[in-house]
Amino acid sequence: MPITAIQADITSLNVDAIVNAANTSLLGGGGVDGAIHRAAGPELLAACKQLNGCTTGDAKLTEGFKLPASYVIHTVGPVWQGGDQGEAALLASCYWRSLTLAASVSARSVAFPSISTGVYGYPIHQAAEIAVTTVNATLEDDSAVESVTFCCFSAADLAVYQACLNQLAR
Ligand code: AR6
């Protein structure tokens, strides 16, 4: 299966690129962003400072430094504001832009956290549906990326992603 879901700490994954759920400053934060910066070491922040931030829905690339992953793709998900502020399109854009950047450096395996569903408050069911359908459509569109892992932090999130993947397989 080119698209799978697991429960893990994304900083432990031995893939070509991991995706970070960052903020527009790209200068670090809590949640998965904090975990990635801690595991990658201070060189990651130094690299991020060169990037001039990132707009919501877009993504930027750095090396992975001390991480097992070669690259970190920093994307900025939307803050949930009720659903009528373009959140769905912005979240889909995060997945699509991240995979485009991964392909640009020939990264074949990519892992995503559940973007926007932590402090940004995006409802997990809706977010997982967008994540799974956008990644599936992008990979079907002849992407250089061969495998995508949805790296869930909780068992409850994993169950939601798994249900979305099962829907795809029907
Ligand atoms: N591995 C995998 N997933 C994780 C990890 C980890 N080590 N740690 C947390 N998660 P969040 P957001 C999950 O809040 O909602 C930051 O401060 C977490 O359980 O990290 O996009 C940024 O700087 C949740 O399921 O990201 C921004 O300011 C998911 O990762 C803001 O938070 C995303 O939660 C971005 O908010």
Image: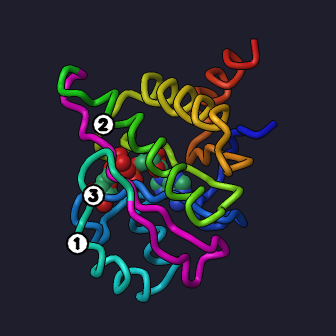
Q: Position of residue 122 (x, y in %)?
A: 34, 33
Give the quarter of the image for residue 85: top left
Identify the residue at image location x=69%, y=44%.
6
Alpha carbon separation for disc pair 2 and 1: 25 Å
Alpha carbon separation for disc pair 2 and 3: 14 Å
Which stretch appears magenta?
A: 60-83
User: Sequence order check: which comes first, mark 2 or mark 1?
Assistant: 1
Identify the residue at image location x=51%, y=79%.
40
In the rendered image, the vertical position of residue 73 relative to residue 67, given as above or below: above
Q: Which element carries disc 2, helix, strand or loop?
A: loop
**Disc 3 residue crowd, few under 14, some 14–19, many 20+, Cα 10 Å:** many
| Total tally of numbered discs in the picture | 3
Q: Which element carries disc 1, helix, strand or loop?
A: loop
Q: Which residue is mark 3?
A: 23
Q: In the picture, which quadrant includes the C terminus? A: top right
Between 149 and 158, the one nearer to me in the picture: 149
